[in-house]
Amino acid sequence: MKKQGFTTRSLNIPYSKEDPHKALQMPLYDSVAFEFDSAEQIAANFRGEYVAHVYSRASSPTVEYFELKLKALSQSHGVVAVSSGMAAISNTLMAVAKSGDNIISENHLFGHTYALLNQTLPDLGIETHFSDLLNPQEIEKLIDNNTRAIFFETVTNPQLEIADIEMLSEICKKHKLLLIADSTITPPNVFKAGSFGVNIEVISTTKYISGGATLFGGAIIDHGNFNWELNPNF
């Protein structure tokens, strides 16, 4: 069978459940809450025994389909959609690092990301070591037993510096660290992060993916290539 191109794949991603009306485009679900057939079914859902949408703050069919699309297009293990790019970054970093931990990042970052790392996370006990991420010797000097990840932008905003991703990946593998990339400027149609050794991508879908900055959104993409037993927080 001929290998499908990116555009063909993006137009032929199946729904998680068959649409009862056979709609060619996934309908938009504007509901806040979803009904169950019985109290027992609700209880089973809360116990994790029956998977279903409950409340749109957590999930909805519309968001789920977006996640399935992005998973297919990024050829990743799993995707979680969130409310913005900064939500993707903050949720990811606060999940992988706890009080007493540190991460390593670059000197040039999107302004709000820098403020998160330099002002907000220290109040939670999470330190950031800022480094020249093109200098492997400088990076390795900063790594200690409490380092959990290297976080970088594939193309820095707004300096447009290009990261040496394969070098960063080798350092992370050597020291058993997560490699987390903000790939907002390099969406999946131009950049296959997993093939470069990136473990987690965070994306502001507000930019290219929304089709012209018309909708706020963000995504956390797990490429399934990190052993989570190496992170003591999991």
Image (cartoon, rainbow, N blue to C red):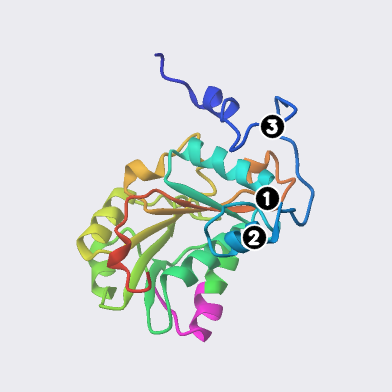
Residue sitting at the far top: 1
Q: Nearer the viewer, residue 133 or 174?
A: 174
Q: What residue sits 75% from the left and 41% below the top?
A: 28
Q: Quadrant of residue 87?
A: bottom right
Numbered badge on residue 60: 1
How far apart are the alpha carbons under marks 2 and 1? 21 Å
Identify which residue is drawn at 34% across, 70% down: 148
Q: Is residue 109 left or right of residue 216?
A: left
Left or right, residue 121 beside residue 145: right
Q: How many neighbours does mark 2 have within 10 angstroms: few (below 14), some (14-19), or many (20 or more)?
A: few
Tell me where the magenta segment starts and ends, as one range.
Answer: 117-129
CA–CA distance in space, label 1 to label 3: 14 Å
**Dot label at residue 40:** 2
Residue 186: percent from left, percent from top: 50, 43
Mark 1 or 3, nearer chain start: 3
Nearest to N terminus: mark 3 or mark 2: 3
Return the mark for residue 19: 3
Give the SS element for disc 3.
Answer: loop
Q: CA distance from mark 3 to mark 2?
A: 25 Å
Local packing at callout 3 (Cα closer than 10 Å; few below 14, some 14-19, many 20+) is few
